[in-house]
Amino acid sequence: MIVIGYTPYPGNSGSTAEPTAQPTSEPDNDDDDQGGNNAPQPTSPPPAATFVPLTATPVPPTPSPVPALNADLDADYSSLVFYASRVGEPPQGMSGEVSGGDGGAYTVILHVRNPEGSESTYNLTTNGTFDFDSGDAGDPDFGTTVEGTWTAWIEASDSVGTTATSASATWEVGWYPSHETP
Amino acid sequence: MGAMVKKAESGQIAVLIVVLAMLFTGLAGALIDVYVLLEARNWAYQAAQQAALVGVSKGREWPGITSDRGCLEPMTLNEGTARSEAESLLQKEMSLRGISDYDHEVRVLPDASGGSVSGFPPETVRLGEGRGDWSASEPSVGVYLSFPVQTFLMPFFGRPQVQIDVFAAGSIHQPANVCP
């Protein structure tokens, strides 16, 4: 007869659980190291469950993140001829892209500063990308009326008022006068 | 006796008048010739200069300026356009002047840094640098023009015509902030 001892689970020292089953047959005496066909399986009580109190802390719902508002502006040409249209050359043109933010239609302010420091602004709306040319500016020599370095940039706003400013696009305007050679 | 002296004096005066008349005629002829030659040379120089300036102005290669290098492109010349424009204007000027017997030569240095042409202009010219190697540091057009001018006095010295030779050139100025 085998008496299965029971050691209380350390974390449950106060438990009063007792074995609930006793062997019901004798062990076989053969040497096959096998249990008898009808060898009773010792049953021991499983360790008592350990209950760990859990405290749930409510987490406030996180709104889905709004992508940052981005604004980009490029000039069609990096160098142009002074009063380009008068010699059959193209004036400047701009292309821009606004993305992110609250989406939808964006309000864009195009700033164009000539080499003398005089600045012109043009108000646009776009759903993402836009082109701005001499026709939009109402000037056939847009971006070519002063020699030197021109600068342009955009300020974009989304529907909730978030604003973003693009990097500056620059271009050079020059004239190549003819002269007598002594 | 007195009558004979008076007659001799009057003969001397007559000879003197004739000599003076010839002298003044010759002087006037020389002045006219100088004026004609100067006027012809100045006109020819201006015609050649206008032709050169039109050549460089209309021969400018604008499309190269708008390439995307981030700086101003150096100006170059379209050689064919520059030459034809210069020759066209020169022919028009000569036609207006009524000169059909003339020689001309138009040479173009189309590169941004100019260049040189040896043996041009082909004859020594009073204005310009004379015969030799024409060189320029900018895109340039050179115009050589030569035509004969009739004179009043020179035929007496065996030169019924005087050849006028002029040379003029025009160039394109490159901006300061041009690409290196």
Image (cartoon, rainbow, N blue to C red):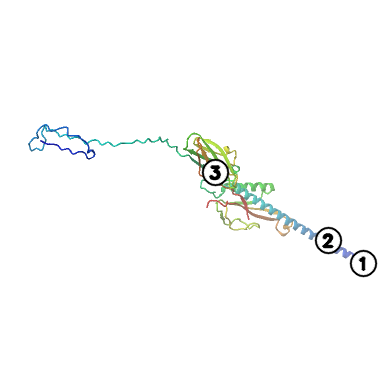
User: Which amino acid, by three-letter code, is at mark 3?
Assistant: Ala
Determine whether, in the image, residue B94 is placed left or right of residue B12. left
Chain under numbered label 2: B
Per the image, label 2 sits on a secondary structure element best described as helix
Asked whether disc 1 touches disc 3, contact meaning CB atoms under 8 Å apart, the reply is no
Which callout, 2 or 3, points to the residue nearer the camera? 3
The N terminus of chain B is located in which quarter?
A: bottom right
Q: Residues within 10 Å of mark 3 (few under 14, many from 20)?
A: many
Q: Secondary structure at mark 1?
A: helix
Question: Of all residues shown, which one is farthest toward the left?
Answer: A30
Mark 2 Cα shell of 10 Å, populated few (<14), some (14-19), many (≥20) = few
Residue A152 is labelled as: 3
Q: Whole-Å distance between the Cαs marked 1 and 3?
A: 107 Å
Q: Chain of mark 1?
A: B
x then y, percent, for residue B5: 90, 66
- Residue at numbered disc 2: B17
Amino acid at circle 2 = Ile
Q: Earlier in the sequence, mark 1 or mark 2?
A: 1
